[in-house]
Image (cartoon, helix red, strand yellow):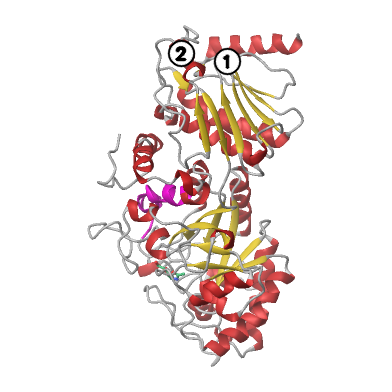
Amino acid sequence: MRQRRSLAAVVTAAALCLPGFAAAAEPGEQAGPTGHQPERQLTDVIPAPVEAEPDPRADYRLTPFTVIRTQPGSAEARQVGTYLAETLRPATGYHLPVVSWHRPVPREISLLLGKADPRIGDEGYQLDVARHRVTIRANTAAGLFAGTQTLRQLLPAEIEADRTQRRSWTVPGGRIVDYPRFPYRGAMLDLARHFHTPDEVKAYIDELAQYKVNHLHLHLTDDQGWRIQIDSWPRLTTVGGGPGTGVDGVGGGYLTKAEYADLVSYAQSRFITIVPEIDMPGHTNSALSTYAELNCDGVAPPPRTDIEVGYSSLCIDKELTYTFVEDVIREVAAMTPGPYLHIGGDEAHATTDEDYQKFMDRVLPMVYKYGKRPFGWNEIAKVSPPTSAVPQYWGTTNTNAELAEAAARGHKILMSPANKAYLDMKYDESTPLGLSWAGYTEIDDAYDWNPGNHVDGVGEDSVLGVEAPLWSETLRDLDDIEYMAFPRLPAIAELGWSPWSTHDWASFRERLAEQGPRWELRGVDFYRSPLVDWK
Ligand code: NGO
């Protein structure tokens, strides 16, 4: 009884105070079998759900009386409920109180743990939309979060507005059972070529989360700049990340440990794990030009802000190199709760194969010593690292002998083929930003490949997942990032989440068109590909 009374009090408060209340004051369940058609179909979601069974008699209408009820006793479920309420409040103007009661309430959206379809695993969810309630069930808070992101896309696009919209809010009825194809669905942002501020990274995280991306790889160091505070080598950031260290001498900057920690927890609140990358032994000019003693001849090379690659190398035969690397790995591992630490290893053209092997033989054990699982660009496959190390494929061909051998030895591979998944490739010859060394990548190119058989000898079972890297040689601000990421990021996210049986360009292109108005309302810049009939 007490619970019901307090609900009434809340709703009355909503009726009295909230601007949106009047708009929906004919509180409504007019939606449903008669008349009102929802604008969305149950399958209008990116990534495509595993299974969707529409029930047109069961449309649900969000009203000023809707309550979000989360699993009693679960602080995590409550956080997901609070995030959902925060995303739905601005456009609806509804109060949407979040409660953790045991008993169901009328017109609720409930987020509950357990008792779902057994297939959903750790990250999946079951979403039931009925006339009087929406129920999301999952085994974990991550699954509940994924379910809420689906629910968000099932509401009309105006739900993304930051001001109250005078309209009704109907969710199409039926059931979705959904879970990921691969455990790792990633994006990468390059902070080294141009620094991107914590706020820009957070804005990107907010977008990634909507497409069920669960890892963000940060490329933190390169020839141009060093972007993460390392206490034992302080000049890395004050000098190596200082003003003018962006490409063409533009910008500069770095993350303090406090800012990094804040980003890690912000990402965690959206169920995204940060994967830090310290690129070595190549791509190290910023460290080498900051600390002369790291060079074989003890002479610091000049800082460089051009976009040449493959000219720098740590000094393989100097013991100080390994003191330096261990200090960095220790500090980065300590500030990173996630399981992975990326050590780069790409384009070490200034290091001989023998030296590269020597270097990796010393450095890979350090990653394990500090409790992390190493990631590296696919070049690390040639040193036969322990099989728990993850090579990240960035080639442009469908054959790679070293990668196939690594898969045969039992490695999991992360797929980021540059001609498909690199978000910094130009869309076509007229794209003002980006590079084109791997070719032009239109939205259909980004979508049409199968990570489970893209490289000969690397089958579905050997694939850890997919990642869409965004390198920043030409990208200075958030608008630039967004313009290159959208609409291709959702394509890569769908390849990582949705089963291959749902893969369908015609359907994807239509679902993508529906994202356009959402991006506009959120102020997200995007490329209006002529291949899509944007709404
Ligand atoms: C390559 C190179 C990067 C460039 C990027 C640009 C890898 C793994 N190494 O990818 O340094 O920024 O291309 O597309």
Name the residue: 66% across, 56% down: 338
Looking at the rendered structure, the secondary structure element under dot 1 is loop
Quarter of the render that holds ligand 1: bottom left
Residue 330 point in image, percent of width and height: 69, 69
Residue 345 point in image, percent of width and height: 54, 75
Name the residue: 29% across, 43% down: 532
- Residue type at numbered disc 2: Ala
Label located before the other in sequence (2 or 1)? 2
Q: How many marks?
A: 2
* Nearest the eye: 298 or 89: 89
In the picture as drawn, the residue positioned furthest to the top comes out as 26
Quarter occupied by residue 521:
top left
Q: Is residue 55 left or right of residue 139?
A: left
Query: Is disc 1 surrounded by few (<14), some (14 to 19) or many (20+) residues within 10 Å?
Result: some
Q: Are marks 2 and 1 in contact (CB under 8 Å)?
A: no
Query: Is disc 2 surrounded by few (<14), some (14 to 19) or many (20+) residues within 10 Å?
Result: many
Can residue 173 be seen at all in this image of the molecule? Answer: yes
Q: Which mark is residue 31?
A: 2
Compared to residue 436, the image places residue 524 above or below, namely above
- Residue type at numbered disc 1: His
* Nearest the eye: 185 or 339: 185
Magenta span contains residue 490: yes
Q: Main secondary structure of the magenta part?
A: helix
In the picture as drawn, the residue positioned furthest to the bottom comes out as 297
Query: Where does the magenta region start and end?
Result: 475-494
Residue 292 point in image, percent of width and height: 55, 85
Magenta span contains residue 99: no
Q: Is residue 249 left or right of residue 301?
A: left
